[in-house]
Image (tube, helix red, strand yellow):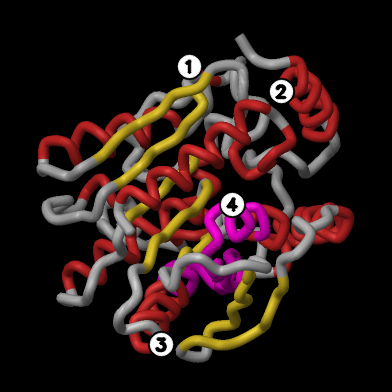
């Protein structure tokens, strides 16, 4: 059963999502939504004691979040979500600060190009080039990739390309509510009444805004279509009744069959990408702590 805090947060979010343009459906206006998200980010206070430093890696704008005390030289990358249309390094600050504070590691977030102005492969290329830049800057450090929603898709696809190109792979992958399958094979309508954030018509929306004519069977778009053999240890977290939940279940099954060290955790009574609210609820805080434990297992 969901905690009181989680129920309260869900209630607030449902009211927020009732406002025009807030829900990810066929009527979303990316430009307006970006302004809303950036306005919300300005009100969120990062964890005390962390610092932020802007930088570039392979010409990709990034921001490094450092805890007051660093206990590990390894690196954690946070790839934000937003349907490939919303978000940047600044809007990532709140959760990046939680990750840095809890892990005692430096956390990088990035500003990747967004659709519809920059459809595939722009954002994907930015994520991949940023990862290459990290490998060059930290040749002896382990790198972990974490992302929610579209960011989770990017970390999987970036890792697939790194594997294809023979690069050193991340030490671990953490996905919150990742969309991994855009081929139209999932019946998303069964979650119509249980997900108030991402609607069942999300695939046509992504096809229009992000794919822009690209083949959804491309593994760098739908990672479930790729060869998962040799992928790094992976942690998947979902709400059991969210529109994108089957994506992680399919990925988990295929990764397991490919011999990947993979685990999946399903929650009920939460919502899409709920872990990024950090310590705001017992459920999200538990995921945060278990995420850090997962990272420490492979450091």
Q: How many angstroms separate mark 2 from mark 4 (CA)? A: 21 Å
Marks 1 and 3, the one that precedes in the sequence: 3
Report the residue at 45% width, 26% height from top: 188
Q: Nearer the viewer, mark 2 or mark 4?
A: 4
Q: How many angstroms separate mark 1 from mark 3 (CA)? A: 45 Å
Q: Quadrant of the N terminus?
A: top right
Give the labeled residue for mark 1: 190
Q: Magenta residues?
A: 97-124
Q: Where does residue 39 sit, x and y in percent of width and height?
A: 86, 58
Tag 3's secondary structure? helix
Disc 3 crowd rating (10 Å Cα; few below 14, some 14-19, many 20+) is few
In the picture, residue 260 is in which quadrant?
Answer: top left
Q: How many angstroms separate mark 3 from mark 4 (CA)? A: 23 Å
Which label is found at residue 6?
Answer: 2
Marks 2 and 3, the one that precedes in the sequence: 2
Disc 4 crowd rating (10 Å Cα; few below 14, some 14-19, many 20+) is some
Q: How many angstroms separate mark 2 from mark 1 (CA)? A: 23 Å
Pick the front one: 222 or 41: 41
Q: Where does residue 18 sit, x and y in percent of width and height?
A: 82, 30
Tag 2's secondary structure? helix
In the picture, residue 278 is in which quadrant?
Answer: top right
Q: Left of 53 or right of it: where is 134? A: left
């Amino acid at each position: 059963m969901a905690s009181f805090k989680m129920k309260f947060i869900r209630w607030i979010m449902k009211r927020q999502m009732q406002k025009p343009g807030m829900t990810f459906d066929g009527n979303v206006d990316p430009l307006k939504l970006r302004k809303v998200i950036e306005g919300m980010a300005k009100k969120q206070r990062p964890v005390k004691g962390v610092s932020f430093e802007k930088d570039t890696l392979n010409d990709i704008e990034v921001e490094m979040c450092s805890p007051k005390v660093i206990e590990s030289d390894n690196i954690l990358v946070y790839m934000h979500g937003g349907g490939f249309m919303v978000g940047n390094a600044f809007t990532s600050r709140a959760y990046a600060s939680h990750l840095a504070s809890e892990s005692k590691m430096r956390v990088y977030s990035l500003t990747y190009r967004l659709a519809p102005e920059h459809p595939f492969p722009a954002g994907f290329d930015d994520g991949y080039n940023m990862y290459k830049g990290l490998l060059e800057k930290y040749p002896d450090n382990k790198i972990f990739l974490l992302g929610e929603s579209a960011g989770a898709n990017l970390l999987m696809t970036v890792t697939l390309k790194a594997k294809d190109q023979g690069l050193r792979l991340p030490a671990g992958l953490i996905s919150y509510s990742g969309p991994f399958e855009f081929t139209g094979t999932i019946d998303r309508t069964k979650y119509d009444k249980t997900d108030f954030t991402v609607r069942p018509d999300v695939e046509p929306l992504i096809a229009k805004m992000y794919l822009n004519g690209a083949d959804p069977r491309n593994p760098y778009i739908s990672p479930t279509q790729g060869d998962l053999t040799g992928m790094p240890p992976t942690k998947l977290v979902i709400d059991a009744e969210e529109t994108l939940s089957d994506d992680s279940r399919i990925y988990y099954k295929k990764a397991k069959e490919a011999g990947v060290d993979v685990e999946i955790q399903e929650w009920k009574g939460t919502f899409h990408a709920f872990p990024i609210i950090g310590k705001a609820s017992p459920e999200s805080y538990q995921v945060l702590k278990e995420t850090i434990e997962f990272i420490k297992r492979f450091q």
